[in-house]
């Protein structure tokens, strides 16, 4: 196996781990949506999201990746919000 194939294999391994973590995160997102519904809390909490983004950037050892980490974190939270909205809408439809 050449260097290029080795690097691709490593990316594949990392992707598998990331997808497992993503799935776990989205399951918790569903629980958060239910909590927010039960407590009449809006889905979007911009201050919390800003704190999470900065916290995630602080975990970096290579700060040349700051802008990419911000973009990644922002997109991840957008997906989480979409999932929460979707779940809340499904719940409304089922309870009406």
Image (cartoon, rainbow, N blue to C red):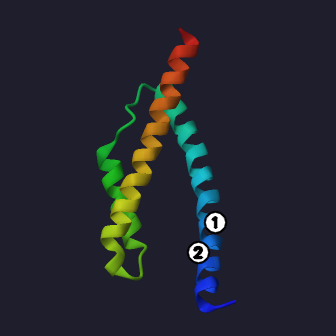
Q: Is residue 6 above or below residue 89?
A: below
**Label 1: which secondary element:** helix
On screen, residue 45 versus residue 90, left or right, reads left
Q: Residue at x 50, y 17 (%)?
A: 92
Tell me: residue 1, above or below residue 68. below
Q: CA distance from mark 1 to mark 2?
A: 10 Å
Is disc 2 placed on a helix, strand or loop?
A: helix
Write down the quadrant of residue 42 in the picture: top left
For mark 2, does the 10 Å Cα neighbourhood hold few (<14), some (14 to 19), or many (20 or more) residues? few
Q: In this view, which residue lies farthest toward the bottom? A: 2
Query: Is label 1 or label 2 in front?
Result: 2
Using the image, tell me which numbered label, if any, was put on residue 11.
2
Q: What label sits on residue 91 in the rendered view?
A: none
Say if mark 1 contacts mark 2, CB within 8 Å: no
Marked residue nearer the N-terminal end (1 or 2): 2
Spot occupied by residue 20 in the image (x, y as percentages of width and height) = 64, 58
Q: In the picture, which quadrant includes the N terminus?
A: bottom right
Q: Is residue 24 left or right of residue 39?
A: right
Q: Residue at x 64, y 91 (%)?
A: 2
Tag count: 2
Q: Residue at x 58, y 75 (%)?
A: 11
**Residue 79 image position (x, y, % from top left):** 45, 45
Q: Position of residue 65 (x, y in %)?
A: 35, 75
Question: Percent from the top left, x then y, of residue 73?
Answer: 40, 58
**In the displayed image of the protein, which residue is found farthest to the right?**
1
Q: Residue at x 52, y 38 (%)?
A: 32
Q: Which mark is residue 17?
A: 1
* Residue 9 located left or right of residue 53: right
């Amino acid at each position: 196996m050449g260097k290029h194939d080795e690097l691709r294999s490593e990316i594949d391994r990392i992707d598998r781990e990331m997808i497992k973590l993503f799935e776990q995160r989205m399951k918790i997102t569903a629980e958060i949506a239910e909590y927010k519904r039960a407590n009449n809390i809006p889905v979007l909490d911009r201050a919390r999201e800003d704190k999470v983004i900065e916290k995630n950037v602080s975990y970096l050892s290579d700060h040349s990746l700051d802008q990419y980490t911000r973009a990644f974190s922002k997109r991840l939270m957008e997906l989480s919000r979409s999932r929460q909205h979707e779940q809340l809408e499904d719940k409304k439809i089922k309870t009406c």
